[in-house]
Image (tube, grey):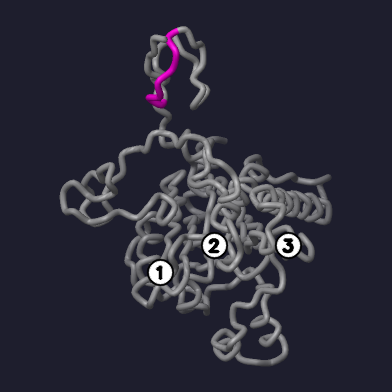
Amino acid sequence: MSTTTCPACGAAVPQEARFCEECGAALGGAAPAAPTTAEIDELAPISAPTYRTPAAPPPTPVRACLSCGGTVGEDGYCEVCGTKAPSERDHFREDPAPWVAGVCDRGIRHRRNEDAMALLASATPGERAVLVVLDGVSNSIDSDVASLAGARAAREVLRTPLPRGMGTPESRVAAVTKVLTDAAVAANEAVVETTDPASANPASATYAVAVLEGGVLAHANIGDSRVYWLPDGGPGSQLSVDDSAAQMHIEAGMSRAEAESGPQAHAITRWLGRDAPEIAPRLGTLELDTPGWVLVCSDGLWNYASEPDSLAAQVAAAGTAVPAELALALVAFANAQGGQDNITVALARFDPTRTTEQEESHG
């Protein structure tokens, strides 16, 4: 029997076959175009659950070396300086617009990155941005896959603008509450769907999201990933409230420093996952009227700078107003402190002056 080669995966197939039995590609036509980086990011998870048989991986896009900017070869090493590159899941970045960016990094001590993020932003600065961060619980199975699926699911729910309600403040709050809760439910469903039903230790994750629309910031969280507002030159605020044993100690009168350094500092009381007690995020809104940074992060960052003023000091020390550069600087700071956990930093730069100018130009 004569054979030919599948143009998609390279497998040997019978000459008369119409489809490849290995990858399912149609035969007899032109070879399919390689997917773009954006298509790979949106349509295929970076890794697959361990209990499933993954499909053939898409072609690997060309990557730049994090050390020198050279090309990373197929063997995972830079062709210029020889540095071994981390996997795409160990370190990835998103910058959907010049004023919004994020970095998700494995850190130093963990063997894999179980954090995840999913961002979107309008081209107009300050108009609309969504920052979603999930921190997979490290002692649960497939939490790296589940956290990424959950982050992307929440982002899709939040892709359209938040509802305005029926014209009253109460109606607006109720409408926004529903959407933010729906996003958390969607994230939870994605986490559950990527978990082996027979697992005795199902995947779980914390959840934090910020939605910036004009000068209004809405936020939600479950667990101990956080949302901060860091205005230029003024006192910052931790907008989210942790679901954790440390937070319970703080509310009972213990100092933040003592509670967050104790043996139960990172014991969470609520989370996403099949065994989650409830999916009801803590919610809040804030009207912004001064330039500053919206920051959503995992505990891999705030471990080393929990107080808003401490984080603001690190922002100032970075000396940049470029979100992508600042996100990298904050991750580097956390790694320099020991990198005990995975680190995710998602940022949106808000400037009411630029937002007003954009609104007037479109008026």
Image coordinates for residue 213, horizontal then vertical, percent = 61, 49
Image quadrant occupied by the C terminus: top right
Write the residue at 61% across / 53% down: 211
Residue 169 is left or right of residue 89, and the answer is: right
The mark found on residue 315 in the picture is 1
Q: N-terminal of the two: label 2 or label 1?
A: 2
The residue identified by callout 2 is 296
How far apart in space, not on screen, are marks 3 and 2 (Cα)?
A: 15 Å
Residue type, mark 2 in image? Val
Residue type, mark 1 in image? Val
Asked if the residues shown at circle 3 and circle 2 are in contact, with their CB atoms under 8 angstroms apart, the answer is no
User: In the figure, 225 relative to 359: above or below?
Assistant: below
Residue type, mark 3 in image? Pro
The residue identified by callout 3 is 281
Asked if the residues shown at circle 1 and circle 3 are in contact, with their CB atoms under 8 angstroms apart, the answer is no
Q: What stretch is highlighted in magenta?
A: 9-15
**Camera sees residue 114:** yes
Q: N-terminal of the two: label 3 or label 2?
A: 3
How far apart in space, not on screen, are marks 1 and 3 (Cα)?
A: 28 Å
Write the residue at 74% across / 63% down: 276
* 335 or 52: nearer the viewer: 52
Image coordinates for residue 296, horizontal then vertical, percent = 54, 62
